[in-house]
Every structure is written in structure tokens, then in C-alpha cells.
Image (cartoon, rainbow, N blue to C red):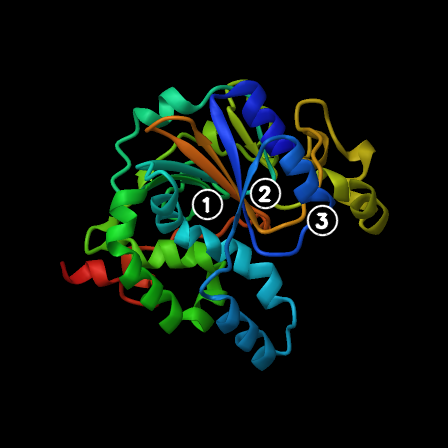
Amino acid sequence: MVAVHTARKFTSLVPYFIYDGSDNDFTVWLRKHDVRIIRHRSLFRDALAELGRKKGNPHFEAALSGAFSRVELPEIVASLDGAERVLYTDCDVIFVAEVVPELEANPCQYFAVAPEGVLDDYVNMNTGVMLMNTKRLRESLPEFREYIARNLAALEKESWDEAAYRWFYRDSNGPLWDRLRPELNWKPYWGKCAEAKIIHFHGPKPYQRDHIESTWPGPFSRSAHSPEKPSVLRSGKTRRTSGRSQVVRRAGPAVGSQSAVTGRLAATHPSKTKSEYPIRSPFGSR
């Protein structure tokens, strides 16, 4: 809800919602606020359910199929109005300033992303905010789908669909993605940033604050924070949403945005070199 509200308040984006499920209070709210709902089920949902059964984890299907829906966004957009650029965001974001002009200026050959845990680490990037070139991604989509299906179990080693983008879209020279400034995917655990345009609650969410502070009173207690170093739980307010994913796109031919319900734990891990990726990308032979 907050992502939709702030996108409309601060940007020229228009919200859409990609959803796999039955109607509920949230879908009623979306319709009331003129958000178009697009019914869609991920092609990987059954495979994720089967993998979950093998691993004894019944949550794989529901928790991950929404995240993998972003893979199919270029094809979904083609069936709508064919926008060539779409901005995907996880649902746990807040827009605080206009983003469209900066996104339009990005070269975005395939997609553009910002770092995940370390501010200057564009190898271990985060797909929670992605500017997509839908035309170019559609060209490689059949091969990308096959790649994911073939290596689905291996992707668990490194954040699932995010790993798929990291492993697939690279060649012998390294990553094929373009860069977004960190201010377009700002994590509260990085500290305050007056220039941030999209704040991404990557990891703990504000609605989890009371539970976290009561369960782990040490590092998350209110007394542990200094005014200069606010924790992720002090940096704003948001709400959990139900559903799978939502698209926010600009009216017209240029920029759009989507958001998926699944979040990821914040992780700072050493940067991989191109030789360390476990599965060879098809781009490597081109």
C-alpha cells in the first residue's frame, strides 16, 4: 500500500499489480484506488512446489513464485501495452522523489541495478529495484527460462531468482547489467541519505520492530541506536502487503515499475569474480 501511495504522490509512475491468488481485502483496496490487477501464475510455481516437497519445505511455492514472476515481466508487458522500459521494485519500498528522468537517461541494455549489501559492490547487486529493457530481455527470455528450470535447485545457494540474473547475464568480461545509483535502491542499514529517491526495507521490516526488539533486545533495542545511525526499523513506516507482485509504470512509452512481495535478508558477502560463478552463462560463448 505504501509503495503504491508514495509512487503516486512523488513520481509520475502508475501502479499495476501482478497477482496469483484469490480476492481479499488487499485486492479490494487496490481496485478502490484504481490499481489494475493482472492475474498471473509463475511458470516455475509447480517446480518450486516439487522442490519444496523434496526438501521438506512447504513454503517454497508460495514464498518464491512471486519473486520469480519478475522473470516473466517482459512478456507480461508485451501483452499489455509493450512499454520498452519497466522499473521493477519489491513491495517493501517507499518512493520519496521523482525517478523517471534519471531512469530514462540510463543506457539499460538489459537491466540496471544497484548494490546489495556494500555500497560500491555492483557484482553482488540487488534485484529489489530493477530498471528493465523489456525488449532485450524478451529476446533472451526463452533461454533464461530454460536456464532457471535446469538449475533451479542450485539457485538456492545464492538468493534464488537474484542468483539467476547474476549468473545468466554475464559474459567472459563480467556482468552485462548497467548501474543504478544506490540512491535508487537505498537500504536503511546504510544510514541516512537525504538524496535517496527509493528506500528499500531490505531485511527486517518496520512492522517487525516490536517482535525483533522483544526477541533480540541487545542490538535492536531502542537504547542501542544513535541519532546519526538509525536502524532499519527506525527509518520509516510501511505495512505488509498480501499478494504476489505489483507493477508500477509510467503512463506513456518510457518508464515503469513493478514490485514483488518476497523480501530478502540483508547480506554482505565477498564479491565473486567471474570465474567463481558455479554455472556457466550462455553469454559466455558469444
Position of residue 8 measured from the top left corner of the image (x, y, whole percent):
56, 23
- Label 1 sits on a secondary structure element that is strand
What amino acid is at disc 2?
Answer: His
Residue type at numbered disc 3: Asn
Circle 3 SS class: loop
- The residue shown at (83%, 51%) is 215
Q: Which residue is found at the position 69% from the left and 29% from the top?
A: 236
Quadrant that contains the C terminus: bottom left
Asked if disc 3 and disc 1 are in contact, CB closer than 8 Å, the reply is no
Q: Which mark is residue 24?
A: 3
* Classed neighbour count for the residue bearing mark 3: other residues with Cα under 10 Å, few (<14), some (14–19), many (≥20): few
Which residue matches tag 1? Answer: 126
Distance in Å between CA atoms under marks 3 and 1: 30 Å
In the rendered image, the quadrant that contains the N terminus is: top right
Label 1 neighbourhood size at 10 Å, few (<14), some (14-19), many (20+)? many
Given the current orientation, which residue lies at the most extreme left position?
Answer: 286
Residues at discs 1 and 2 in contact (Cβ within 8 Å): yes
Q: Please state which of the two labelled residues, at mark 3 or mark 1, is closer to the viewer.
A: 3
Q: Position of residue 27 (x, y in %)?
A: 66, 43
Q: CA distance from mark 2 to mark 3?
A: 26 Å
Q: In the image, 98: left or right of 19?
A: left
Identity of the residue drawn at 29% across and 61% down: 142
| Residue receiving disc 2 | 202
First in sequence: mark 2 or mark 3? 3
Q: How many marks?
A: 3
Q: Would you place residue 47 above or below residue 72 in this image?
A: below
Nearest to N terminus: mark 3 or mark 1: 3
The residue nearer to you, when weighing 37 against 268, is 37
